[in-house]
Amino acid sequence: MTAQLIDGNGLSRQLRTEVAQRAAALKARGTTPGLAVVLVGDNPASQVYVRNKVKACEDSGLHSVLEKYDATLTEAALLARVEALNEDPAIHGILVQLPLPAHIDAQKVIEAISPAKDVDGFHIASAGALMTGMPGFWPCTPYGCMKMLESIGYDLRGKHAVVIGRSNIVGKPMALMLLQKNATVTICHSATQDLKAHTLQADVIVAAVGKRNVLTADMVKPGAVVLDVGMNRNEEGKLCGDVDFDGVKEVAGYITPVPGGVGPMTITMLLVNTLEAAERAAGS
């Protein structure tokens, strides 16, 4: 059996078309959804991510502002800039690209963003809303994973989901989202003993640790759904995920590729969150 691919590129295009239509409807009523992206320093990967986010906004009819600062920018100056964006009615979403230079407390900056504009879903208020099932912004990567499960019509009720990774950005929110859909959830991490024993019981596996081949074919139950959130490089320098794709695709029922899987969905869900922030601000 060869797994069916869950095409992140195709699903992203479909969702971005919907975003563009909703943005056009909002514009017709006098509100243009606006995202501010703040980049501090010259991290090459961050520059690529930021460029892709800004382009995605423009392609979908959203207004985007990119603010670049030297790595020497003080924490106080960055906090003041965030506060000004909080007060700007033309900006509905604020994204401060991580990582930040070592002298800046990233958590302090995240908490300075208004929860109403926290389209990354990293603010403690957003985390609390997800935890308690209240309306708020979901972190973009796990939100994208949920959309991928939805796209294949997968009913999570009563299913066993295993999340490998416990980061605040993916692992923990992923587990909570799966729980909201009535899955039974196990979170595995670096201190988990016998990872294979857990994954072999899983109907759904989300691999999100940033380590190549953390999940191999002998660790997957036949027919399971495998979502690969990892972003690594192999010996040839090619992009790959956390999953041994060639092996696992022969066992799994569905699998996401890297690239072209979860990656494009992350930026798409950022657009969805920004649009929703604008719709809320406009009272719709």
Image (spheres, rainbow, N blue to C red):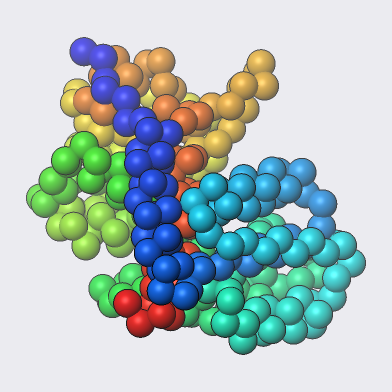
Q: Quadrant of the N terminus?
A: top left
- Quadrant containing the C terminus in the rendered view: bottom left
Query: Extreme front residue here?
Result: 28
Give coordinates of residue 194: x percent, y percent.
35, 37
Residue 263 rendering spot, x and y as whole percentages: 49, 40
The residue at 65%/18% (across/down) is: 235
Camera sees residue 173? no
Task: Determine whether, in the image, residue 198 is placed left or right of residue 121.
Answer: left
Whether residue 73 is situated above or below residue 211 in the rendered picture: below
Q: Is residue 36 left or right of residue 118?
A: right
Q: Is residue 134 above or below residue 258?
A: below
70 relative to 203, above or below: below
Residue at 24% of width from left, 41% of height from top? 151
Q: Report if residue 270 is visible in the image.
A: yes
Q: Residue furthest left?
A: 158
The image quadrant of residue 195 is top left
Q: Image point 53% across, 59% down: which residue?
A: 62
Residue 272 falls in which quadrant of the image? bottom left
User: Considering depth in this image, is 91 or 137 the residue closer to the camera?
Assistant: 91
Identify the image quadrant of residue 200. top left
Residue at (58% x, 76% y) in the render: 90
Relative image position of residue 215 (x, y in whole percent): 40, 30
Residue 182 appears left or right of 4: left
Question: How many numbered marks are there?
Answer: 0
Q: Nearer the viewer, residue 80 or 19?
A: 19
Q: Position of residue 224 (x, y in %)?
A: 22, 31
Q: Looking at the image, is 184 positioned above or below residue 32?
A: above
